[in-house]
């Protein structure tokens, strides 16, 4: 298994109150799977994504990523794991505004200590892979939303991570562009990448082979995408979703 | 990831960031620059002063000792020296004959702040010295016209005088004073020589002097306490010469063993020490002012860096998500702070040097800045940036990546 979560809990202190964001989440993800994590806001899906992305550590429970127990690593170790194992794709793209597309894609390789020539070469080919070979020297503000997200995907791919972690990747895009991005994810899935997509949109989750539904920090359903995503919907909604 | 990568990447970001907020960078630079400029100008002026003083002191003759009842510089307990026995000619003679290091020994008596006239010309504030021929050698006087005194002039109590260059210029403007007469306390002295210019020490002319034969002086002004000037072959022998002379004088003045000396052996170095004490205090105050200015600049840098950290919270979050360690972020912001400071320091150094130069042009103070001071100025400024960057950098590094990514 590429990913194994065992009874992951995450509690926060907000003032005097303790918020239970994750209440014991366990699941496994095999290499090459495409998984959606779906849930209402406040269901704990963002917290889960932060834990899976090694941006946050669980209060309790164990998390194995690519054979390593990362649940209690130090800050430095987590930084290295993020650099090596995770490719982040955010709703708001999270590109550095002053860097060109190429510079943004090179960034994780810089932190890996790669030589300039090799990292430029790899960043270039990653941008070509997402169809932005002609936009490498543009800055984010000179690019459309869809292009920005492609730069972000190239940045996630360039380190050849074991997990692509996407947080509402189409949330800031119009529906056509969103479809294009999802199309890109499908390509990556077919190419063998492991993808975890966090979303609140059932239609999006329905396109994933597998989905997990979270509610109040617990997994309430785990199964094929369309089944989990469209759980409890009317037949009409199901048909509408299938049509997209 | 290696520190080398941190430094390279941090440096690249720092250079780039400087160019982005030009106005802000310029203001921060100015703050540090003023501090460094002030500090450097002050250091330059004081170094210049010290250099000039040292040169002037050297021109006085460094290989000489002075024996008198009192030290050159009397601090406290002045009354202790009043009851000391006078130094006699016989004692002086003993030093001249017995000291292995003394190359010349002469007595010296002084009348200070005298008025001199020649025809209708007057000069005041003249130091009148009564002494013998070897005085010239001991103090390194050159004669530009005529001759110096001889011991025979003294024995015959000749009414002759050698003029300091300022005296000569003011009493005999545009003509040679040789063979002319100067009047001192209503007595005429025939001018037999003129001395080479010596310049000023601490703003006092060393050329407002009139040198007359020792015995002539005593005949006019009466027997009085005198000092003894001793010439030594080489400045490195001064310590040995002093020990030697102290031994001789204790013997001839019958100072019992265990009692302190009842005379003083002085050196021009002691003048230098006093000078250093005086300027040292001034130095301290001035450098303090410069440091406070730098402190203000440093706080300015800290302020700017805190703003910068806040503005770039998202950027920090992104970098952390992509694998930057805390140290990477610390290095990035520290480099930025020290780079701004160093550039400010470089500009300040240039301005400070200009200010010091200006001062030396406009006033008689000679400002000089040693090359090392310049390097020091830039490095010091960078250090100020580094120190005042620590807190903002630490704050940046301690940001929670999740929070930072969410920051609007």
Image (tube, coloured by chain):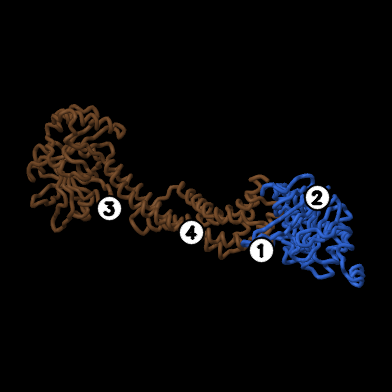
Chain colours: A blue, B brown
Q: Residue at x 40, y 57 (%)?
A: B289
Q: Earlier in the sequence, mark 3 or mark 1?
A: 3
- Taking B112 as reference, is A239 left or right? right
Q: Position of residue B227 (x, y in %)?
A: 16, 39
**Quadrant of the rendered structure where residue A177 is?**
bottom right
- Disc 1 chain ID: B
- Taking A54 as reference, is B34 left or right? left
Q: Nearer the viewer, mark 1 or mark 4?
A: 1
Q: Residue at x 90, y 69 (%)?
A: A238
- Disc 4 chain ID: B
Give neighbour class at mark 4: few <14, some 14-19, many 20+ (Cα, 10 Å).
Answer: many
Mark drawn on residue B203: 3
In the picture of the structure, the residue carrying the numbered disc 2 is A3
In the picture of the structure, the residue carrying the numbered disc 1 is B407
Q: Are marks 1 and 4 in contact (CB under 8 Å)?
A: no
Instruction: Pick the residue in front: B170 or A150.
Output: A150
Q: Earlier in the sequence, mark 3 or mark 4?
A: 3
Between the residue at mark 2 and the residue at mark 4, the CA separation in whole angstroms equals 52 Å
- Disc 3 chain ID: B
Q: Secondary structure at mark 1?
A: loop
């Amino acid at each position: 298994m590429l990913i194994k979560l065992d009874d992951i809990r995450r509690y926060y202190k907000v003032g005097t109150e303790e918020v239970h964001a994750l209440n014991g989440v366990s699941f496994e993800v095999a290499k090459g799977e495409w998984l959606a994590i779906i849930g209402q806001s406040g269901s704990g899906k963002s917290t889960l994504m932060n834990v899976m992305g090694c941006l946050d550590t669980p209060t309790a429970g164990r998390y194995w990523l690519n054979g390593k127990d990362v649940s209690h690593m130090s800050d430095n170790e987590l930084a290295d794991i993020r650099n090596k194992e995770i490719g982040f794709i955010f709703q708001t793209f999270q590109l550095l505004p002053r860097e060109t597309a190429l510079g943004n894609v090179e960034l994780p390789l810089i932190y890996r200590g790669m030589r300039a020539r090799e990292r430029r070469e790899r960043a270039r080919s990653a941008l070509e892979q997402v169809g932005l070979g002609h936009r490498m020297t543009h800055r984010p503000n000179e690019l459309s939303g869809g292009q920005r997200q492609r730069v972000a995907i190239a940045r996630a791919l360039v380190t050849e991570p074991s997990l692509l972690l996407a947080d509402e990747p189409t949330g800031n895009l119009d529906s056509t562009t969103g479809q294009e991005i999802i199309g890109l994810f499908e390509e990556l899935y077919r190419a063998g990448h492991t993808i975890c997509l966090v979303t609140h949109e059932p239609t999006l989750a329905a396109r994933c082979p597998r989905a997990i539904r979270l509610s109040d920090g617990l997994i309430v359903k785990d199964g094929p995408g369309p089944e989990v995503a469209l759980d409890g919907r009317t037949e009409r909604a199901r048909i509408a979703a299938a049509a997209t | 990831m290696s520190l080398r990568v941190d430094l390279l990447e941090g440096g690249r970001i720092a250079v780039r960031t400087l160019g982005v907020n030009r106005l802000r960078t310029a203001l921060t630079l100015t703050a540090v620059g003023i501090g460094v400029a002030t500090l450097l100008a002050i250091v330059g002026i004081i170094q210049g002063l010290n250099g000039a003083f040292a040169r002037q002191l050297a021109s006085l003759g460094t290989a000489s000792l002075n024996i008198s009842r009192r030290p050159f510089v009397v601090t406290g307990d002045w009354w202790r020296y009043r009851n000391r026995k006078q130094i006699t000619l016989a004692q002086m003679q003993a030093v001249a004959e017995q000291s292995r290091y003394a190359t010349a020994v002469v007595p010296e008596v002084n009348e200070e702040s005298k008025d001199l006239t020649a025809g209708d010309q007057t000069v005041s504030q003249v130091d009148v010295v009564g002494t013998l021929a070897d005085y010239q050698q001991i103090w390194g006087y050159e004669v530009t016209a005529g001759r110096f005194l001889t011991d025979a002039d003294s024995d015959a109590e000749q009414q002759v005088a050698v003029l300091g260059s300022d005296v000569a210029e003011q009493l005999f403007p545009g003509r040679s004073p040789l063979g002319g007469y100067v009047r001192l306390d209503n007595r005429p002295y025939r001018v037999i020589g003129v001395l080479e210019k010596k310049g000023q020490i601490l703003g006092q002319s060393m050329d407002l002097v009139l040198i007359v034969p020792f015995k002539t002086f005593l005949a006019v002004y009466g027997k009085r306490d005198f000092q003894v000037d001793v010439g030594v072959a080489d400045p490195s022998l001064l310590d040995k010469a002093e020990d030697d002379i102290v031994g001789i004088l204790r013997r001839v003045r019958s100072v019992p063993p265990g009692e302190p000396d009842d005379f003083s052996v002085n050196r021009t170095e002691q003048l230098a020490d006093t000078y250093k004490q005086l300027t040292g205090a001034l130095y301290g105050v001035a450098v303090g002012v410069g440091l406070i200015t730098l402190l203000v600049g440093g706080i300015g840098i800290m302020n700017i860096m805190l703003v910068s950290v806040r503005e770039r919270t998202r950027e920090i979050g992104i970098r952390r998500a992509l694998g930057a360690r805390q140290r990477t972020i610390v290095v990035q912001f520290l480099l930025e702070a020290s780079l701004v400071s160093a550039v400010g320091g470089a500009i300040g150094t240039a301005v400070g040097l200009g200010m010091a130069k200006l001062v030396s042009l406009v006033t008689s103070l000679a400002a000089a800045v040693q090359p090392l001071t310049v390097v020091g100025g830039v490095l010091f400024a960078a250090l100020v940036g580094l120190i005042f960057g620590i807190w903002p950098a630490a704050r940046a590094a301690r940001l929670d990546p999740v929070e930072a990514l969410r920051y609007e």
